[in-house]
């Protein structure tokens, strides 16, 4: 059984500035992430700088993330293809992204385009020995009216993986995105663990009292994102399910969302989450003395 490594997500635009500090903080891996745009970054040059900073620290790049809408935006799809082509320069075994959507339309409406685009992307990744991890974030969309990601709901996953059954395409899963849908993440993970190829370490707290008083139709927030260790999820259960399912990847903390431990407390929050997740996995591996 391989130990699940604990890492953190680093915005691509801040990678050069932040990584030297991350390397010294006890994280075992990192995800280098971009959202909708590379912000002018040259991936080839950035990969060289990231490798130089990580050096012989043992910290590896778990994923190169480019979260975009490859179904509707040809330029973003081209950039995603470039990320797949250059993932090896970072030493990343996978590229993380959204499933895309036809904006304002339903999950069913987007499925033919998803099949076309991701069969091509899946082959491109497989030819390079890479995986594609689809994040499970609704991005403000619903089943009937998507924004940029149909891959937020288990019924959508059933449809997606029927249309594109490639073994190198799976889920970048986190509990918080499911809790915003009032889905029990532990029950869900037990069913879907075999399709999980990457984990985001982000939790949430559900305000059940607020739901009883105000419902869920937007008059008031009923779920709050939290760092692992501050939310509702039992991460020892998560780790157990992952090990039982044969998962040998990592958990990368997705910070920058906790409304209490954010801002000047962000690094405090992330280090707490890192130590908590290492505790949940049983600490560091210790060989038997016999």
Image (spheres, rainbow, N blue to C red):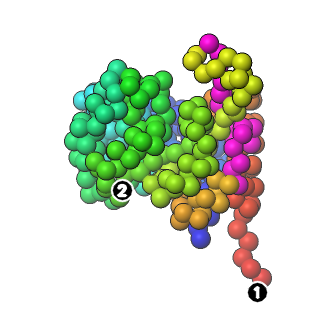
Q: Position of residue 171 (x, y in %)?
A: 45, 48
Furthest residue in direction bottom, as rendered:
290
> How many marks are shown on the rendered structure?
2
Is 196 above or below relative to 178?
Answer: below
Is 226 above or below relative to 174?
Answer: above
Callout 2: SS: loop
Determine the CA span between mark 2 and mark 1.
Answer: 39 Å
Residue at left 26%, top 57%?
A: 127
Residue at left 59%, top 71%?
A: 1
Q: Which residues are magenta?
A: 219-236
Is 27 above or below relative to 98?
Answer: below
Which is the main secondary structure of the residues drawn in magenta? loop
Apparent side of residue 237 relative to residue 10 in the rendered image (left or right): right
Q: Is residue 100 among the parts visible in the rendering?
A: yes
Badge 2: residue crowd in 10 Å (few <14, some 14–19, many ≥20): some
Asked whether residue 226 is drawn in magenta, I would say: yes
- Which quarter shows the C terminus? bottom right
Residue at left 71%, top 23%?
A: 212
Furthest residue in direction top, as rendered:
219
In contact (CB < 8 Å): disc 2 and disc 1: no
Callout 1: SS: loop
Badge 1: residue crowd in 10 Å (few <14, some 14–19, many ≥20): few
Q: Position of residue 274 (x, y in %)?
A: 70, 47
Q: Nearer the viewer, residue 16 or 145?
A: 145
Q: Nearer the viewer, mark 2 or mark 1?
A: 2
Q: Which mark is residue 290?
A: 1
Q: Is residue 267 among the parts visible in the rendering?
A: no
Q: Position of residue 121 (x, y in %)?
A: 27, 46
Q: Nearer the viewer, residue 162 or 61?
A: 162
**Residue holding disc 2:** 168
Q: Position of residue 99 (x, y in %)?
A: 37, 38
Q: Quadrant of residue 22?
A: top right
């Amino acid at each position: 059984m391989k130990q699940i490594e604990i890492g953190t997500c680093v915005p691509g635009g801040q990678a050069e500035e932040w990584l030297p500090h991350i390397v010294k903080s006890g994280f075992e891996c990192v995800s280098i992430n971009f959202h909708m745009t590379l912000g002018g970054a040259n991936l080839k040059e950035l990969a060289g700088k990231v490798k130089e900073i990580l050096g012989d620290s043992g910290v590896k790049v778990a994923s190169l993330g480019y979260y975009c809408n490859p179904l509707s935006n040809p330029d973003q799809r081209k950039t995603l293809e470039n990320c797949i082509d250059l993932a090896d320069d970072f030493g990343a075994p996978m590229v993380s992204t959204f499933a895309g959507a036809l904006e304002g339309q339903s999950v069913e409406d987007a499925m033919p385009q998803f099949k076309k685009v991701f069969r091509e992307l899946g082959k491109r990744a497989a030819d390079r020995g890479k995986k594609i991890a689809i994040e499970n974030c609704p991005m403000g969309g619903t089943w009937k009216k998507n924004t940029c990601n149909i891959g937020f709901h288990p019924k959508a996953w059933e449809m997606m993986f029927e249309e594109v059954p490639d073994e190198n395409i799976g889920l970048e899963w986190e509990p918080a995105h499911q809790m915003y849908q009032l889905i029990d993440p532990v029950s869900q993970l037990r069913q879907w663990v075999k399709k999980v190829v990457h984990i985001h370490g982000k939790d949430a707290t559900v305000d059940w009292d607020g739901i009883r008083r105000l419902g869920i139709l937007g008059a008031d927030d009923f779920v709050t994102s939290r760092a692992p260790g501050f939310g509702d999820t039992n991460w020892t259960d998560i780790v157990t399910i992952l090990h039982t399912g044969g998962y040998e990847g990592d958990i990368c903390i997705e910070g920058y969302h906790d409304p209490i431990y954010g801002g000047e407390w962000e690094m405090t929050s992330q280090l707490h989450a890192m130590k908590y997740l290492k505790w949940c996995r049983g600490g560091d591996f210790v060989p038997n003395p016999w």
